[in-house]
Image (cartoon, rainbow, N blue to C red):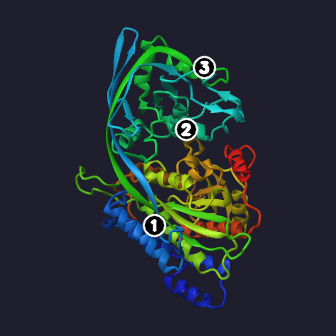
Amino acid sequence: MKFSHSLTAAAAIIAAGCGSGNGPDHASMLITPEGILAHTRTLSSDEFEGRAPGTEGETKSVEYLAGQFRSLGLEPGNPDGSYFQRAPLAGITSSVTGSIRAGSRTIALNPLQDFVGVSRPLQPSNEVANSDIVFVGYGVVAPEYQWDDYKGLDVRGKTLLMLINDPPTPDEKLFKGKAMTYYGRWTYKYEIASEKGAAAAIIIHETGPAGYPFEVVTGSWGRENFDLQAGDGNKARVKVESWISLDKAKELLAASGHDFDTLKQQAVSRDFRPVVIGAKATLRAVNKIRSVDSRNVIARLPGSDPTLRDQYVVYSAHWDHLGRDPNLQGDQIFNGALDNASGAAGLLELAKAFAALDPRPKRTILFLSVTAEEKGLLGARYYAAHPLYPLARTAANINMDGVNQWGRTRDIVVVGRGQSTLEDTLEQAARQRGRTLKDDPEPEKGFYFRSDHFEFAKLGVPALYTDSGEEYLDKPAGFAEKRRSEYTANDYHKVSDEVKPDWDLTGAAEDLRLLFDVGYRVAEDPKMPEWKPGSEFKAVREASLQR
């Protein structure tokens, strides 16, 4: 690998900065490819057993991160004097069986073949009996778009059948055109079903709109799933959250006298009204439940300005991955080198740079490595629900989930571009370093809603999430798309996600220096970042600041 900065050079920078002041330009150069690689190798080694929550791999991971923060001289981030925040999780292994009565037919649902479900209310069994099925289109209630798929229909006790993604309307002002909004995510659809008092929710899977094949769903949902240990035992959640294959959905609709394509076309209009399809669902879930005490890791660098030190810039990256699968032949460990040992490594490199600053930034900087991202952003969700520092005084969240392992780029991708003024700050920083911003090449996949920053965004904190650039130096056109596709096909959530001999982390170091620039500028600016007009999170932030 062609590294632009050696460990010797980094040591020289540290020595030069000691006792003589160390400004941001100087400190940012402490972020090196070698440093990223060293931490990534450690965290993704077999010794860490794939970093699953509630395992020995978790213990080693969180102790390693805390030890690194301690060695940098960063303070414990928890006001109780520790580097940890307890995140109580519930492991749920659901066996969901059932059938649908449509007309004179009883249609069997075949688990892990054409149907898969999870039951999140924390009790041994949950049942839905003879529940009327209602097709609710895309299941969206979006006041800012004057869109309501429910039209006031009482769906309490009903089973909701809905489509994945946003309504693909011809009006690009609705639902951000090609880019997915949160209304398109499966998590939202189950949340709104619970709010409406439904008994169960079934999402019809389509590979294009979902962004992944049905096998990805069955692979994730057919094993132990996790949730937070809610005080009410998740009693407010629908009894069954599930997916059904497209072919099976067409079968049950046809048996009820309906045509899938016709219903889907109707659902694209604001005028769509829910359709009681004349079928009844009977579902039974048997749960195995276990408690898992997991931990977020947090360190802090106190701010230097008396008027701003009680405001916070949070850098985040999840430390967890999928652990090990003893049922596999050969390699059983999901090392998760890129996803997300590399992001946790980047967090440590940023912490190193900030710790070297003299004087310190005006606002306090927090370094948060969260658990259970792979289980549904649960560590970040727990922090957002139980923040150690008030979210209304949290100026920004800057999140990392995988770094650029293929070399230097002229650009950097902004996932979900158009959300907040943090992107303007990034653009200014990039321009000074001779780089540009690029839109997400796959906005329809909704990546902005699939990593930890989203739990901050949902509660109003402006959040920035970047990805590797598209324009690689000295690489042919299409190189980025080719490598991204190869990673998704060959390594994503597979045991093969390991450090590769051809990794070149020079681009990762440059990306992290940009994120350092953004956080430093936010920490120094008396004005806090804001959501841009049209963001679905703007109203939440404004309301929180008025309390």
Q: Residues within 10 Å of mark 3 (few under 14, many from 20)?
A: some
In the image, is residue 221 above or below residue 385?
A: above
- Residue 101: percent from the left, percent from the top? 38, 15
Q: Is residue 253 left or right of residue 539?
A: left
- Name the one closer to the observer, 406 or 329: 329
Residue ID for mark 2: 188
Q: Residues within 10 Å of mark 2 (few under 14, many from 20)?
A: some
The residue at 37%/38% (across/down) is: 218
- Residue 155: percent from the left, percent from the top? 53, 23
Please state which of the two labelled residues, at mark 1 or mark 3, is closer to the viewer.
3
Confirm or deny contact between disc 2 and disc 1 (CB under 8 A).
no
In the image, is residue 355 above or below residue 522?
A: below
- Name the one closer to the observer, 493 or 364: 364
Q: Secondary structure at mark 2?
A: helix
In the image, is residue 499 above or below residue 90?
A: below
- Residue 544: percent from the left, percent from the top? 69, 50
Q: Secondary structure at mark 1?
A: loop
* Amino acid type indicated by mark 3: Gln
- Name the one closer to the observer, 134 or 287: 287
Q: Quadrant of residue 139?
A: top right
- Name the one closer to the observer, 241 or 497: 241
- Residue 269: percent from the left, percent from the top? 65, 23
Please state which of the two labelled residues, at mark 2 or mark 1, is closer to the viewer.
2
Residue 507 visible: yes
Distance, label 1 to label 3, CA atoms, is 48 Å
* Amino acid type indicated by mark 1: Trp
Residue ID for mark 3: 266
Distance, label 2 to label 1, CA atoms, is 36 Å
Residue ID for mark 1: 503
